Image (spheres, grey):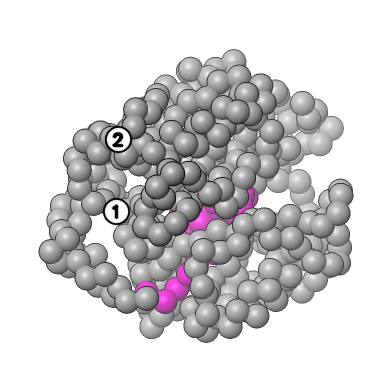
Amino acid sequence: MQDYHEFMDEILVDESTIARRVAELGAQISKDYQDKDLLIVCLLRGGMTFTADLMRHLTINPELDCMSLSSYGVGHYSSTGNVRVNLDLRTNIEGRHVLLVEDIVDSGRTLAHVLNMLRTREPASLRVCVLLDKKMRREVPVQVDYVGFDVPDKYVFGYGIDIDEHCRHLPFIASVDLSKYKKPSA
Amino acid sequence: MQSYQKFLSEILIDERALQKRIAELGAEISRDYRDADGNLVLICILRGGVVFMVDLMRHITVRHQVDFMAVSSYGSGARQTTGSVRLSLDLQTDICGKDVLLVEDIVDSGNTIAYVLEFLQTRQPHSLKVCALLDKEERRETPVPIDYCGFKIANKFVFGYGLDLDEYYRNLPFIAVVDVDKYHPA
């Protein structure tokens, strides 16, 4: 397996820029939910780092729950666009104020599907906070209420986001030079 | 919901002390797993361990993967002292031949973690170790080998830094002790 320096194209968002923006989002969310009982839903595994940092910038005290999703079929999406729930919420969200925290939104298919699923449970409100928005890739319109950074249509890794399961621990967001990246053998 | 200041008895470990110790643990783990570069898998048991794992992994310099498990007990009520634990989310990674480090927020009775270790061992990892942020040794019912320990703590009711108090306050960046006389769950 390669060292990330070998295939990193550039650092898109560095550590201090992320920290500053996460703090701003935390302040905004604290204000918006000041008198509300907030439930944060972290989408595993990509959203874990962002959620853990964002939570600590909140001046309100939210409840935390996690969901794990995968797609049906081979490849990224099945033809139906349906999403499989590997781990469902423990919390009943009926009547709750829910904020979904996600690392990145690109086509918007997964997010749109999750939002539809969660809406059937009739939360009092349902909003979305994403660290990265890859708007150029959007295929279905999806509501995103809080955005950390708009990013170009590049393959990214770091700060919770993996490249073939590696590099989630890096404290910055970087783009991949695909011509230099060798996929690890399974 | 009560403001935590109303029932906080003391801050047991402040943010700076936590971060300093986690950096030390990360350095120690990086040293010990130098030869396992790329083969290390951190496993976090949801939900308490998420914040600790996210901070810890950022201090680990050897290449590694991260994965999650969620467990619950069979039957109603609190976890049984003996007996099996139900897996509500299994690993996505096949750990056969991997160097596995189980990352836990707190080891209390040790019952759940002892079961999880036994369960993981059946999948024949190359090695299996435990890293716990907090060790409440006094409460131990089942012996658990803790290879990396953040802090040994007294038998007090603690919250913050991923640890909840009736599902809230996981977002606080420090570990605090509850004054149970002053705490009124919602």
Q: Is residue A120 part of the magenta span, yes or no?
A: no
Determine whether A167 is above or below B2 in the image.
Answer: below
Tell me the crowding category of disc 1: few under 14, some 14 to 19, or many 20 or more residues within 10 angstroms, Cα based: many
Q: Which residue is mark 1?
A: A157
| Rendered residue at 24%/45% (across/down) | A14
Q: Amino acid at mark 1?
A: Phe
Q: Amino acid at mark 2?
A: Glu
Callout 2: helix, strand or loop?
loop
* Number of marks present in the image shown: 2
| Residue B145 drawn at (x, y percent) | 67, 75
Quarter placement of the C terminus of chain B = top right
Q: Which mark is residue A139?
A: 2
The reply to whether residue B59 is in sight is no
Whether residue B115 sits left or right of residue A111 in the image: it is right
Callout 1: helix, strand or loop?
strand
For the record, the magenta segment spans B38-56
Chain-order first, disc 1 or disc 2: 2
| Residue B123 position by quadrant | bottom right
